Amino acid sequence: GQQVQQSPASLVLQEGENAELQCNFSSTATQLQWFYQRPGGSLVSLLYNPSGTKHTGRLTSTTVTKERRSSLHISSSQITDSGTYFCAMEQGGSAKLIFGEGTKLTVSS
Amino acid sequence: DMKVTQMPRYLIKRMGENVLLECGQDMSHETMYWYRQDPGLGLQLIYISYDVDSNSEGDIPKGYRVSRKKREHFSLILDSAKTNQTSVYFCASSQTGTSDYTFGSGTRLLVI
C-alpha cells in the first residue's frame, strides 16, 4: 500500500527559530495535506497542497510531486506552535486519507 | 456551527465486552472515517464510509465493524473488546472530491 513517511520524528526549537518538516510518499499523491494536532486534542487541517508552494500566515508548504516529497516550513516559531504535525495523502482516488507518523514539535522560551 | 461530534469522550470497558462508539456530523458530508491513534503510529484508517450502507475496510479493520444508516451518523462497533484495542479513536468527515476534512475530538477507550 501507499506509505507516508515523515521526518524528523521530533523537533525541539527555541521560540523564534524556524522549523522544517519533511514528508515523503511512496507514489503520486493526491489531496496532500498537512494537519496539526494540539497535545491531547483533535486534528485540524493547516494546508492543502498537492503540488507547488502554498502559504498561510507563518506556514509555507512546498510539494514536488515528481520527487514524491512535501515540506512544511514554520517561520518564527511560537510556543503555541507546539504539537504534532501530520502529513496525509489520499490513496489512489479512493478518498482514503493515509497519514504519516507525525513530527512532534516542541517550542520553548 | 459545522462540526463532528463523538460520544463518549472517555470510555473504560472490560475485555470481552461490546463497545459502541458514535459519531455525528452536521455538514451533510458524504464520506466519513474512523481512525485509531496510538503513540508513534500516527492515525491508522479502520473504516471509510462513502455514504449510507456503503462502507469499505481501511488498513486495520480486524476486530471492528461499522454501521451507517443515516448520512449524518457513523458508528464503530467492537464486538468482544480486546486490551490491544485500547487507543484514541477519531471520527472524521469530508465532502467527496474536496480537501475539506473535519475531525471529531476523539474517544479515549481503555480496555482492561
Image (cartoon, coloured by chain):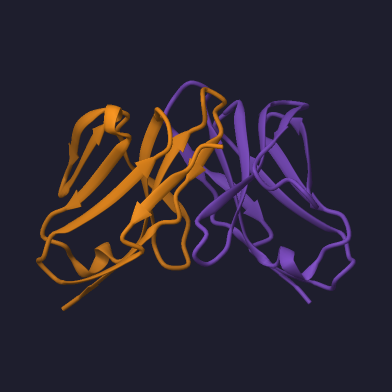
Chain colours: A orange, B purple
Residue at image point 73% right, 30% down: B55
Question: Is residue B34 toward the left or the right of residue A109 in the image?
Answer: right
Quadrant assignment for the C terminus of chain A:
bottom left
Residue B29 at x, y = what percent?
57, 28
Judging depth in this view, the residue of B54 and B106 nearest the camera is: B54
Quadrant assignment for the N terminus of chain A:
top right
Q: Does residue B88 lie above or below B28 as drawn?
A: below
Q: Does residue A19 lie above or below A47 as drawn?
A: below
Residue at image point 62% right, 40% down: B33
The picture quadrant where one finds residue A38 is bottom left
Residue A78 at x, y = what percent?
18, 65
Residue A29 at x, y = what percent?
40, 30
Question: Is residue A2 toward the left or the right of residue A70 in the image?
Answer: right
Question: Is residue B56 toward the left or the right of residue A52 in the image?
Answer: right
- Note whether residue B10 is visible: no
Judging depth in this view, the residue of A11 and B99 nearest the camera is: A11
Judging depth in this view, the residue of B40 and B9 nearest the camera is: B40
Residue at image point 56% right, 33% down: A96
The picture quadrant where one finds residue B45 is top right
- Note whether residue A82 is visible: yes
Q: Does residue B20 lie above or below B70 as drawn?
A: below
Judging depth in this view, the residue of A47 and A69 nearest the camera is: A69
